[in-house]
Amino acid sequence: MLTKGIPLYLAIVLVLACGLCIGYFNSLLVNKLKFEAFIATLASMSIFRGFAYIICGGKAVFVTNKMFLKMGSGRILGIPIPVIIFIITFAIFTVVLSRTRFGRTVYMVGGNAVASRLAGIDGQKIRTKLYMMTSAFAALGGCILAARMSSGQPMASEGLEFDAVTSSVLGGVAMSGGVGTMGGALLGLLILQGFNNGLMMMNIPSFWQTVSRGILLIAALSFDFIRNRKRK
């Protein structure tokens, strides 16, 4: 959009709006068609990644807008702007999940959809809001990544979905829902990054690094399965 002359702030708003629409699409797959959440989002990821390739022609779209590039490389009081955005969003959602009624309903719907429905909670509405928020923040993350790379690259984030799952499970987030914290998810991310950096420092060949990450994902999912059985 920037290369087509659309003003920066309007372009960012439109990108976030696209994220909201994709989140709503995901919620329809889960709420109305009763798809499993993991399968629905993997399918939609493939669809919209394909659209990204089509729109870009499989090539990177280079950006020269200086204000936009500052979003990825600029600093405020010596702190990188992406770090500031992360700290703000992390703090907000930590409070939302732990201190608000909405946060409690999120845990209830994730933990036991039937019980929450009998308690008068509209689980579909909660899920719709969550899908739309997470997709909007994914779109914001895409903006930041494009700003850091000075270009929009449709294949830049391939494979990160598995890192997201692995780090979340390592941080105590239950795949079945209802369990997990922002702090735990951050800890899982740090563990995963430490694991990846350790493989690189040990000069493990890249193909074996891929194998190792797959084994780590299996171990994390196995731990999640065992924990859920004990919880039940």
Image: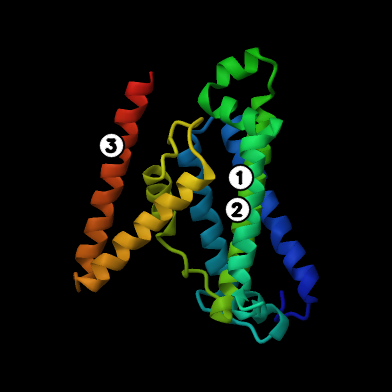
Near mark 1 (Cα within 10 A), the count class, few <14, some 14-19 or many ≥20, is some
- Give the class, few, some or many, for how many residues have Cα within 10 Å of label 2's Cα (few <14, many ≥20): some
Q: CA distance from mark 3 to mark 1?
A: 27 Å
Indicate the quadrant containing the C terminus: top left, top right, bottom left or bottom right.
Answer: top left
**Badge 1 amino acid:** Thr
Residue placed at 74% from the left, 80% from the top?
4
Dot 2 corresponds to which residue? 90
Reading the image, the residue beneath label 1 is 94
Looking at the image, residue 6 lies above or below residue 130: below
| Image position of 182 (left or right of 103) | left
Q: Calculate the distance from the C-alpha at mark 2 to the C-alpha at mark 1.
A: 6 Å
Provide the residue designation for mark 3: 222
Residue 32 appears in view: no
Lower sequence index among marks 3 and 1: 1
Contact? badges 2 and 1 (CB < 8 Å) = yes
Q: Nearer the viewer, mark 2 or mark 3?
A: 2
Residue at image location 64% in from the left, 80% down from the top? 74
Q: Which one is nearer the viewer's eye here, 210 or 187?
A: 187
Residue 21 located left or right of residue 228 = right
Question: How far across and how far down the image is residue 162, in percent?
Answer: 39, 53
Q: Looking at the image, tell me whether mark 2 or mark 3 is earlier in sequence order.
A: 2
Numbered label tally: 3
Q: What colouring style does the render use?
A: rainbow
Helix, strand, or loop for circle 3?
Answer: helix
In space, the residues marked 2 and 3 are separated at their CA atoms by 28 Å
In the structure shown, which secondary structural element does the residue marked by tag 1 occupy? helix
Towards the viewer: 41 or 126: 126
Residue 120 in percent (x, y) is at 70, 16
Left or right of 180 on screen, residue 86: right
Indicate which label's residue lies in the foreground, 3 or 1: 1
Identify the residue shown where x is 70% and y is 59%. 16
Residue lying furthest front: 77
